[in-house]
Structures are given as C-alpha cells and as structure tokens.
Image (cartoon, grey):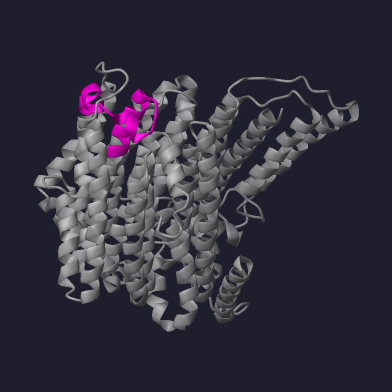
Amino acid sequence: MVSPVLLIAVPLGLAFLVPLISLVSRRAAMLVPVVACLFNLVVAITLMPGVLDQPVVEKIGGFPPPFCINLYAGPVGVLFAALIALAGLGIAVYAMAYIRTGPVDRYHLLYLLLLVGATGVVLTGDVFNLFVFFEILCISSYALVAYMGNKSGLEASVKYLIQGAVGSGLLLMGIGLLYGQFGTLNMADIANRMGSVNQVSVFVPLALIISGLGVEAAIFPLNAWLPDAHSSAPSSISAILSGIAIEVGLYAMVRMIFTVFGATSILMFMVFLGALTLLLGELCAFAQSNVKRMLAYSSIGQIGLILFALAMATSYSVAGGLFQLLSHTLSKALLFLAAGYMIYRSGSMEISSLHGMGKRMPLTSLAFTIGAFSLVGLPPFVGFPSKFLIVRAALARQQSIFTILLGFVLLGTLIEGAYFFRVVQAIYFKKGSGETGRSYAPAVALVSMFIFAALIIFVGIYPQPVADAVGSAATELLDRAEYVRSVLQ
Amino acid sequence: MRIFLSLVVLAVIAVGIGKTLMEIPFGEDTTNVGGYYIQSGRDDTGAANIVTSVVVGYRAFDTLGEVTVLFVAAVGLGAVLAVGSASGRRRDVEPASLVLYTGCRFLFPLILLFGAYIFIHGHLTPGGGFQGGAIVASAFLLVYLGCRGRRIRHGWSKATESLGGLVFVGLGLLGLTAAGHFFLSNYLPKGTVNHLFSAGIIPIIYVAIGFKVGAELAGVIDDLVEESE
C-alpha cells in the first residue's frame, strides 16, 4: 500500500537536497522538479483506484485523529495531487529551456516548494496545517514573481506580497477564532461540532477565512494583485500561478465552506460573486492590448466560472466545476507557455507584435490556438465537455435565477471567444512588419507544450474517465457526514 | 467620505470579532484536544516538556511545514537579492575597535554553546530547535557587527541547512517502514522521562532543526549584510 504522505514528503526531501546538488552542479538542480513531479504523478495514479472506493486517512505520528494531524486522501485530494504533478511536470520540463539567467538553482528549488505547498493544501485534513502549506505556496510564489529582477516584477511581487500577507493574516485570525470555540483544529472534528455552538459566532471566522483565501483564489474584489503578478512573472511561473496556485486557493475555500462549516446559507452569495468575477474578468481581458495581461484577466474570469459552478452545490455542478478547473489548468498553462516563447522572440508583450507569428513560429502558434479554443469551449477540446456540464447543471436547477445567471455566464464566454479569436487572427491572418524568418522554440519547450496539447485533445475526445473521477470527487465534497465519519471512526 | 466608510467597516469587523471572542471561554478547562495533550503528552511521547510533545510529537508535521516556510523565505530572499545585485562589489569597511573585536571573539563560542544547550535540551526544558537556532544565528550576527570583513562560508551554511531538513524528512520517512507504519511516528525507545537520552526521535529532530535554523538565519544575515554594503 502506497502512503499518500509520500506525495508531500518525497518532493520535500528532494527540495532539501537541491542546495547540496547545486554545490556540485548548478544546472543539475533543474532536473529535480521533473523527478519529483514524475514520482508524484506515479504515486497519485497508483492511489487513484483505491481512493475512489474508500478514502485513505493517513494519521501522521500514529495518534488517533483529532489529536494528530491527518491527511485525507479522497478522490478530491488525489485528483488535485495528480493534476498538480501533471501540470508541474509539463512546466518544469519547459522551464529547463526557458529559465536561463539568474540564480537558476534557486528558481527550481522555489518552484518545487511551490508544488509541495499546493499538494499539502489539497491533502491535509487539519486547518492549521492547511495554513502552513498555504504559506509555503504563497511565499514561494512571491519570490518567483520577482525572479526576473526587473522593476515591474519587483513592484508586482511587493503588491502581491502585501495583499497576500493581509489575506494570510485574516485566514490565521479566522483559524484562531475557530480553535478558540471548538478547541480542536481537525477539519472533521470541527465539522462534527459545528452544530453545537451559536451560528452567529461561527459566521465571523467563516467571513475571515473566506476573505483570506479569496485573496489567493483571486475572487472579486480581492484580486487586484493578480494581473500585475501574472503578467510580470516569467511565463513558466505565470503558467503555474494561473494553472495551480489560484485553483488551490479556490479548493481550500470550497473545502472550508462545504466540509468544515457546512455553510449552505452563503452559497447563493458565492454564486453571484462567481458570476460577477467571471463577467468583470472577461470584460477587463477584452480591453487589454498586452497578451499576458489578457491571459491573466482571463484567469480571473475562469475562476469566477469555476466558483459559479461549485457554489451551485449540486453533484452535477460541482463535477462540472472541478472538470472546468482541470480544463482551465491544462489550457491556461499551455497558453502561457506558448505565449512565453512568442514574447521572447518578438520582444514585446503587445498583441500587435504577434502579427504574422503563425508563419514565423508555426508550432508554438498552433499550441496557442489549441489552448485558446479549448478555453473558449470549442469541441473537440477539453473545454467543451466541462463547460457543457456546467450549462447542463445550471439548467437542471430549474430556477429562473440560475437561468438568468447562466445567461450572463454565456455572455462571458462570448466575450472570451471574441478576444481569443482576435489574438488568433492576429497570429495567423495579419502580416508581420519585422522579420519573417522561421524560428522554433527549443525542442524541450515544444515537447512540454505538445504534452499539454495532446492531453487537451485526448480528454476532449474521451472525457469519460475524467468525468467519472470528478463525479466521485463531487460526491466527496458534498457529503460532509461521510467525511466526518471516515476520519473520526 | 472614504474615511467615514472605512471607519464604519472597521467598526463592523471589530464588533463581529468582539462578539465571537465573547463566546470563547478563556481560562476555563474546556479545550478537548489541549486537555488530552496535558494528560497524556508525557506518556505518549516521552518528552518532559509538554510544549515539545505537541510541537515535535503530535503536530510534528506542522513543524516540518514551518521549517519549510523558513527555508522558502531564506531561499526566496537570496534569489531576489542575488538578482538585484549581480555585481559582486565589496567595499572596504573600517575595522571595529579592539575592545569590540576582542569582546565578540570572546562571546562567540559562549553564545554558540548556549544555543546548542537550548536545542539539545528542547525535550526537557523550555526552548527547542527554533529558539536554539535563533541564538546560534545571533552569535553570527555579533561577528558581523564586531569583526567586520569576516564571512561565513556559503557552502557550509547551505550544506548544514540541507542536511538538517533531510534528517527531519528522512526520520519521518523511516517511520513509514518502522513499527506502526506512520510518517513521523516515534519509533525509537522513549527511555526514562527527564533524561537527556529520552523521547525517541524528538531530540534528534530538535538538533537537526537547531542546526538548520541557525545556518538559515545566519545565511539571511549574510545576504542582508552583503546587500547593505
């Protein structure tokens, strides 16, 4: 039996090994994240069939649950861990070619620790432990945003750091108030005692925790840091921040709402917030002329869509939301990676400088187009089944308010289609002014892009295995009693 | 208007937090998990210091996470500063006075000894790896202030940092193979409470943390000194 703790401990051990490796060879450090992600991917896939039947509760230190920290490896946790390892692997391969300047060994070390933090957040079953891993995730991303050392990167990083630190502070206050009232930090134990206290006094920690996590999850109006941070970071880091970091923040928020608090009363508010975040994100993205800022705003829109689906809290809609999350991770990572080399070659982030790229960099342009079409939700790419599930789930609620909100969501998708087609048009159908010679991205980077592209097409054509996995993940998220029972039995 | 609005929002938050704090029974013996730790911490982990039995026993996984947070912060600071000052400029500094210099040289080993005492006895007396490590780092800070121009060797501090972390993770992983099959389970003999060699893996972890935190904070001081010159 493979233990889920390996998903955290082995990459962490490898991360501690990096400084020793880089004493021998600085370049060798770049292989470590690749090895760690491969290992995690294998472990997560091995664990998957087992946890679909029965979640694994790993007691760390061997004490019985409310007294120890436990990991909860259910379908949600293992699915996320697999996704983090998969996206992490693709982006780590890309970064081997893309990151050439600066303290390279430290880049790869921080990148690996970011993934460790994300994996820890999705697997833990303890609120304070969640905070600790969340901090690992956040602090490594602050440093990575500033990696280029230019003025805009440092400014974005400081902005991100200040807002993120305030968010973490709110989260910690919320956790402290919870501990004061319940005398325990175990998620299942808190959920179990939730009914025994005055509901008004639980609302304040709930509000603090949601606003704290909302900063990292980039929910409107807490997302002012995101466009700067995602556009000034190196492209590989933009990809991991957009593809993994904000999703993990959203996961933590949803886990708190569904499992720990069981707060069904605020779900309607979250549905509205999701639709609003979606519309504002897409509208801002439409107005951008800088391709990376456009992608960053589009991430806000997508997070809004995912939140909209998750907060509807039916098994269909949560499955749709998780599916959309997966498809956003793959598509947005691919978009940032492809945009990275197009920007590198053209020397500017303006959309107008991408004119004629379809001729100059045919493969990278193709990858970008696949990512864009998938994000918009065209068949046969992965974005289609996921958006379709969400639409079906919203209609199945059979309430006019959801139908109206769905109208706004579809409007958001239309806007999304408009600005992505504009870029694709610029790439293929506008004549470039400068050089016209062919140039390719390095082979390693192309391999990584085509792994993502192949996955997008493959899952788009055969969505069934993924749909089954997100289906049981949705059941886990919604079934609070089962979560409590399996931890505290 | 804006000030007024912010004041209103602040007031609402303050009232909310205040009301919640009123619900919390401070000073009463109601916390269920805490009560268990006080009752059986000593028997479960073999550590005479109950705080340590929680920090490195029941919640050792959090401690591993916190060690990592410090590691991330130190590496991140190093990365940002390394990019910021690519040129290895060094300015000659005026040496400190003889009294300061001699005093620092006299105090340095004593502070190291005290730091080591704090982290080695973490499972018996108040203190532990983080506190001991911070004291060790303060010895290095003193050297930077009093004996200017002296530097720690980066290779050594990095290697110590790495090894400290590796020992912690490695001990945890060994727990998966040892009796009990749990990560970070205390599989070594617990010995007699209040003896130096007791509490199984706890003192080993604290020594590893002490070295790691000491090396890490000394490295941070070194990075910052370099930057300010």
Against A307, residue A336 (above or below) is above
Relative to A401, is B59 on the left or the right? right
Furthest residue in direction top, as rendered: A437
Q: Nearer the viewer, residue B70 or A53?
A: B70
Please tell me in which quadrant of the rendered image residue A223 appears: bottom left
Q: Nearer the viewer, residue B23 or A148?
A: A148
Please tell me in which quadrant of the rendered image residue A369 appears: top left
Against A341, residue B37 (above or below) is below
**Percent position (x, y) of residue A45?**
21, 46
As for residue A245 lying within the magenta part, the answer is no
Q: Quadrant of the C terminus of chain A?
A: bottom left
**Percent position (x, y) of residue A257?**
37, 68
**Percent position (x, y) of residue A88?**
32, 39
Mainly helix, strand or loop, the magenta region?
A: helix
The segment highlighted magenta reads: A335-364
**Percent position (x, y) of residue A332?**
29, 43
Identify the residue shown where x is 75% and y is 39%. Answer: B111
Identify the residue shown where x is 38% and y is 38%. Answer: A290
Q: Nearer the viewer, residue A220 or B198?
A: A220
Evaluate whether residue A475 shows in this view: no
